[in-house]
């Protein structure tokens, strides 16, 4: 049972390297353009400034800010900070279920993530050399590293609630993965409970405790996320409705409005200015 591949097929991750070398000053977020950030502090110290305060980072660490939240990574000359950084593009933008599932910021010492050690060695060797195609290789390595980090998060139950926490729970993961793979099926709480080998009541209570949503709300959220991606891709509502489990475009539109608060047409129109800004001034 592959808990990540379907997510990554529908809602992939892209990276664009924008800094590699010593950090004397600040990497800020004036050009985030609906993107997150990932930083690798290879040596030295730095401070992560977030609206709720500043975290001092004193050992080699991975820093992930998955959504375009105001923040700065700051270091003075005496900190001897050596940093590699990239912006993160989640397919589906702010509605990407992976981006939504992560906390506002994650800071983890590299020594605690042995799963990514080989990728880090390769990434750092590219970052501080002058090989041909260096930036393209670094971008792909950042993407690979993020996927490996998501694996680590699930393997070590590093999330306390949300989709990633549910996928890390082996009692829930089968039902959730089946929902991801087959959104068109008429899922009921009882059917999901059967797939998890639990009673309906136990499954519903455990799902809500771990994921933070009822099973029905989660199915709705997943279907609407898929519909949003397909709308961006230009697919017609009739096809989308069938693909994500609704008997008609109007049924999908009602579910969409219940979840998002607007009609699919209104939502798609609101996305156009965001896509234009991203095209004109990429992060």
Image (cartoon, rainbow, N blue to C red):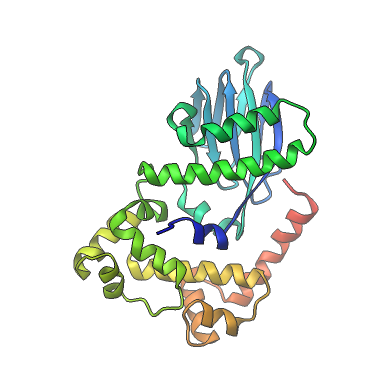
Residue located 32% across and 65% down the image: 214
State the image coordinates of residue 57 (x, y, percent, origin top left). 51, 24
In the picture, measured across the screen, residue 205 lies left or right of residue 34, that is left
The quarter in which the N terminus is drawn is bottom left
Residue located 39% across and 54% down the image: 162
When the figure is inspected, residue 209 is found, relative to residue 31, above or below; the finding is: below
When the figure is inspected, residue 105 is found, relative to residue 184, above or below; the finding is: above
In the picture, measured across the screen, residue 241 lies left or right of residue 135, that is left
Residue located 69% across and 20% down the image: 24
Residue placed farthest to the top in the image?
A: 78
* Residue 140, quarter of picture: top right
Q: Is residue 263 visible?
A: yes
- Looking at the picture, tell me which residue is in the foreground, 3 or 68: 3
The quarter in which the C terminus is drawn is top right
Residue located 29% across and 73% down the image: 189
Q: Is residue 50 visible?
A: no
């Amino acid at each position: 049972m592959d808990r990540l591949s379907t997510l990554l097929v529908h809602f992939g991750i892209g990276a664009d390297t924008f800094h590699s070398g010593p950090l004397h000053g600040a990497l800020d977020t004036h050009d985030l353009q609906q993107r997150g950030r990932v930083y690798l502090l290879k040596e030295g110290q730095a401070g992560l400034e977030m609206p709720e305060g500043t975290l001092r980072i004193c050992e080699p660490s991975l820093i992930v800010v998955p959504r375009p939240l105001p923040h700065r990574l700051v270091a003075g000359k005496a900190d001897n900070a050596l940093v590699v950084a990239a912006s993160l593009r989640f397919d589906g933008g702010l509605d990407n279920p992976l981006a939504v599932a992560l906390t506002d910021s994650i800071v983890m010492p590299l020594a605690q993530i042995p799963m990514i050690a080989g990728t880090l060695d390769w990434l750092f060797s590219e970052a501080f050399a002058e090989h041909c195609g260096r930036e393209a290789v670094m971008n792909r390595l950042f993407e690979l590293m993020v996927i490996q980090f998501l694996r680590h998060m699930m393997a070590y139950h590093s999330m306390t609630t949300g989709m990633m926490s549910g996928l890390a729970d082996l009692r829930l993961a089968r039902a959730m993965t089946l929902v991801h793979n087959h959104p068109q099926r008429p899922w009921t709480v009882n059917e999901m409970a059967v797939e998890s080998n639990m009673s309906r009541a136990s499954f519903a209570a455990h799902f809500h405790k771990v994921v933070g949503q009822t099973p029905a709300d989660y199915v709705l959220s997943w279907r609407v996320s898929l519909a949003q991606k397909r709308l961006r891709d230009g697919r017609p509502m009739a096809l989308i409705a069938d693909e994500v489990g609704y008997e008609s475009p109007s049924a999908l539109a009602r579910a969409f409005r219940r979840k998002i608060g607007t009609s699919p047409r209104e939502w798609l129109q609101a996305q156009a200015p965001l896509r234009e800004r991203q095209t004109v001034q990429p992060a």
